[in-house]
Image (cartoon, coloured by chain):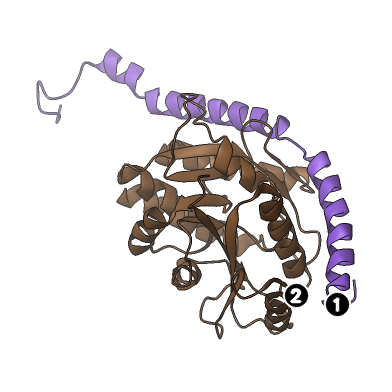
Chain colours: A brown, B purple
Amino acid sequence: MAGSERLSVLLPTYNERDNLPLVVWLLVRTFTDSGIDFEIIIIDDGSPDGTQEVAQQLEKIYGSDKIVISLGISVFQLFLFPSGTAYIHGMKYATGNFIVIMDADLSHHVSCILFFLITPIVYRKQKEGNFDIVSGTRYKGNGGVYGWDLKRKLISRGANFLTQVLLRPGASDLTGSFRLYRKEVLQKLMEQCVSKGYVFQMEMIVRARQLGFTIGEVPISFVDRVYGESKLGGNEIVSFLKGLLTLFATT
Amino acid sequence: ALAPPGLQPPAPLRQALLPLPVYLLVAFGCYSLATVGYRLATFNDCEEAAAELQEHIRAARADLRRRGLRLGAQ
């Protein structure tokens, strides 16, 4: 990254009192060690477990230049999944020209962000360049997961296969939420995307392709839930399928 | 006897075409199973990343405590 560029990390949180300080610490250390100008925007959805208090402590420790807190009162419904409204809200505070979205529960490996900036490639064409979006993928290269049993992996691969067949998106990991966007690209996409949860992440990539944005990929590691509970049940699968069919029908 | 003349393909052709959609479906089903099965088998397990994360967490908790963060019980 050139000297004048700044990275804004959007962190939607819901009940991440234990993970939030660890994620922030990792981000601060990674960016400071690499000399990257950054800010972290914490978008909390009215967590009842004291997440906001922890965020405020972090702001005192690292400075309000680096930690920006945006507090909601259960408007984002993050206890379901981070949806577009949380990102739209957080982007209002973003002063950077690149935006990273990721999960605040330590499932996304922070050091991968450096690779988003330096070495994204399009797997089919092996081309490097200035991409509009860099998407972290669990399914290519040395990307992968940790802590998933066979059943969970099967659901993941099966869902992804279905998505590839129906949408032909040109990106290998559509439901991932570990990505880097140019700020103006993210803003443009936010205006257009209406889905929630997993499908929202998929819709972003599909719309991006429609609008002609370039997408690079970087393998990432997804480490399942060190602390906290996971959220994949029958409901999620049904809404994923509904959303997938909607996208298929409308794009 | 009731079929309009000239509008239906000859009987043998129809018999050959009838199972085609089923064959295609079965073929696609086999392809899907094979592809998903292969991808499932080659799904990477990130042992290194997980171990690295544990180390990072230890370092983070120690450093944050030093800086005055009151951490929850874990």
Indicate the chain on which mark 1 is placed.
B
Tell me if A61 is positioned left or right of B29 in this view.
right
Structural crowding at the residue carrying mark 1, measured as other residues with C-alpha within 10 Å and reported as few (<14), some (14–19) or many (≥20): few
Residue A187 lies in what quarter of the image?
bottom left
Residue for point 81% across, 51% down: B53
Residue B19 horizontal/vertical position (percent): 40, 24
The answer to whether residue A78 is above or below residue A142 is below
Residue, far front: A3
Residue for point 61% across, 26% down: B34
Q: CA distance from mark 1 to mark 2?
A: 8 Å
* Residue occupied by mark 1: B72
Label 2 is placed on what type of residue?
Answer: Arg
Image quadrant containing the C terminus of chain B: bottom right
The answer to whether residue B33 is above or below residue A78 is above
Indicate the chain on which mark 2 is placed.
A
Residue A57 horizontal/vertical position (percent): 73, 80
Question: Dot 1 lies on which element?
Answer: loop
Residue for point 67% across, 63% down: A104
Label 1 is placed on what type of residue?
Answer: Gly
Residue for point 49% across, 31% down: A122
Q: Are marks 1 and 2 on the same chain?
A: no
Residue A28 horizontal/vertical position (percent): 70, 60
Residue closest to the eye, A25 or B13: A25
Question: Dot 2 lies on which element?
Answer: loop
* Residue occupied by mark 2: A17
Residue A222 horizontal/vertical position (percent): 70, 48
The answer to whether residue B20 is above or below residue A4 is above
Answer whether residue A113 is visible to the viewer in this image.
yes
Instruction: Find out whether the residues at labels 1 and 2 contact each other: C-beta distance under 8 Å.
Output: yes
